[in-house]
Amino acid sequence: MTVPVIFGISGTKLLQEEIDLFSEHQVTGFILFSRNVESKKQIVELTTALKGLYPEREIPIFVDQEGG
């Protein structure tokens, strides 16, 4: 049985430790917070990298809007 798990990441880019973790454990999706957003170009690169972790399937990426 697969348990749906949504993960956040620590900063504006994927760290190698995060890549290793997500390669070892399949996640359902990701959630981005203000700490993950720097610019439009950066967010495009980040979401592309996140989707690239699981090229065989769609991976939802959510955005936390709490607080504005």
Image (tube, rainbow, N blue to C red):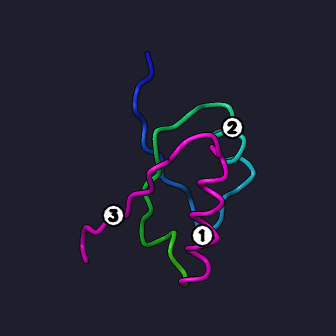
Sort mark 2 into few (<14), some (14-19) or many (20+) by Cα contacts within 10 Å. few
> Where residue 49 sits in the image (x, y, percent)?
66, 59
Q: Which mark is residue 23?
A: 2
Q: Which mark is residue 3?
A: none
Q: Which residue is mark 3?
A: 64
Q: Which residues are magenta?
A: 40-68
Secondary structure category for the residue under label 2: helix
Circles 3 and 1: CB atoms closer than 8 Å? no
Secondary structure category for the residue under label 3: loop
Q: Amino acid at mark 2?
A: Ser
Residue reaching furthest to the top: 1
User: Would residue 40 be found to the left or right of residue 68 on screen?
Assistant: right
User: Would residue 62 be found to the left or right of residue 56 on screen?
Assistant: left
Q: Quadrant of the N terminus?
A: top left
Q: Which residue is mark 1?
A: 12
Q: Quadrant of residue 5?
A: top left
Question: Residue shown at 25%/67% (left/top)?
Answer: 66
Q: Quadrant of residue 6?
A: top left
